[in-house]
Every structure is written in structure tokens, then in C-alpha cells.
Image (cartoon, helix red, strand yellow):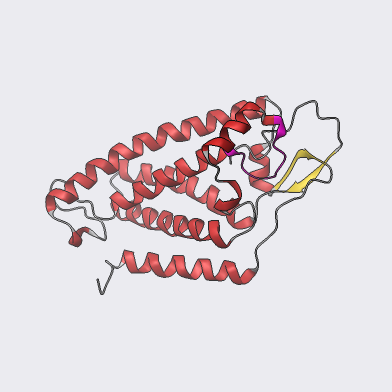
Amino acid sequence: MTEAAASVPEDQAAPRSSVPVWDLPIRLVHWTIALLVAFSWWSAENGEIEWHIRSGLTILFLLLFRLLWGVLGSSTARFGSFVAGPSRVAAYLRDPAGWSRVGHTPLGALSVVALLALLVLQVAFGLPLSDEDGIVTGPLNRLVSFDTAEWAHEVHEILFNILLAFIALHVAAIVYYRWKGRHLVSAMVTGDSKDYPAGTQGLVRAGAGRLVVSLAIAAAVTWWIANGVPGL
């Protein structure tokens, strides 16, 4: 939910219309991950370890799907459509009003990549971890030594605090853009944005076949990891 329309000037004279920006899979992944991160924190704090592991594995599935959807999905979901190099980011910072494409801005893309990377690392370090007593273990614990598993546990906790800081920054940006008259939250709920001039080209949706393939691969890999990567 990052700067879907951050570049449109508030005094834009052109009439506005509802423009499709985010497809349903992106919106479901976004909100479900947000809820599961909160639930993962609650379950860990309250000793509900089984639920914590289930929540983490569900986040893993969603992340795997999101990565696949970033290649096979709708136009605004694809990494190739919004991940920008330094020169493109610099150009956007010099002239934000010159950016007219729907989806993430070059600056918003940095936030997306950072949050996804942090979530991937958070889950990755949770899979092999062990507590100091060796009672609580992740599904990939058998692949590492006890010392490595304990270290993974420590990193898992540190990464969560970093993740919280990034989430706070993300929320602050949303509040700022709402103050500037943008409607990022409603766009991520409905999929449509009214922050663009009429006639703006909306997203190009991916076919159902790509969705099925992405879901199937993500589910298969999640099952394999959840069961301790049998055969490895």
C-alpha cells in the first residue's frame, strides 16, 4: 500500500475517474499478511507456539505466492513494472508530479522491496530456529546445529523489531499521503483509485491460469518446507 497515486498534484485540473490499480490477489495478500504479523506477535507473546508456527507458515505461503505473482501476475503486481534503479528514483524525487503510471512509484517500490525482504528474512530465520532449551523448534531445525538454531532464534527476534520499525514508517507514510489528499488505503481495499486523471490506463489483469499456477507452486513449496523438506 505504497504511494499508488503519490505523484498526482492536489490541484490537478483534469477530471478524475475510478482507475483499477490493484488486483484481488495483491489486496488479499497485503491485508492477510498484515493481520498475520500481528497474530504472530500475539501468539509468540502468549506462548501459543503451535499457532505461531502455523501463522508463520501461512505467511511463508503468501510470500511465495507474492514473489511468483511478481513475475506472473497483473501489471501493477509485477516487479519489473515498478522496481526502479537509482537514476529512476532520483528522477522521481526531482519531479514527483511527472510520474503518471498507476501502481507503485519508484520511491514506493523501495518500501515494498524492503518490507518483502524483511518478511522473507523473518520467516527464513524462523524455520530452523530453536529456543535455548531445544523444546520449541522450527520445521527445518533438523538441518542445522543447536548453536545455529539458537542463533537463528536471536536473529528472528531482532528482525521482528526492525520489521516493526519499517511498518511504523509505512503507516506514517500512509498518514502523510492521506493528509496530502491521497487515498492509498481505500485503493488497497477496493482495488480502484480516484487519484488519477480521467483516461489514465489502469492495471492489466493476469489470467486465471497464472493465478492457479502461482497458488499451486506456493502451496507445494510451503507443504514441503512445513514437513521438514522430505527428500533433502
Kindly tell me whether residue 107 is visible in this rendering.
no
Q: Position of residue 134 (x, y in %)?
A: 14, 52
Query: In the picture provided, is 98 more to the left or to the right than 164?
Result: right
Q: Position of residue 66 (x, y in %)?
A: 51, 56
* Residue in the picture at 47% in, 57% down: 62
Q: Which quarter of the figure has residue 155?
A: top left
Is residue 103 one of those drawn in magenta? yes
Kindly tell me whether residue 63 is visible in this rendering.
yes
The segment highlighted magenta reads 97-107
Task: From this view, report whether residue 22 is shown above or below residue 169.
Answer: below
Quadrant position of the C terminus in the picture: bottom left
Is residue 41 one of those drawn in magenta? no
Q: Nearer the viewer, residue 23 or 70?
A: 70
- The rendered magenta stretch, by its main secondary structure, is classed as loop
Q: Position of residue 37 (x, y in %)?
A: 43, 45
Task: From this view, report whether residue 219 is shown above or below residue 94.
Answer: below
* Residue in the picture at 44% in, 48% down: 36
Q: Nearer the viewer, residue 92 or 132?
A: 92
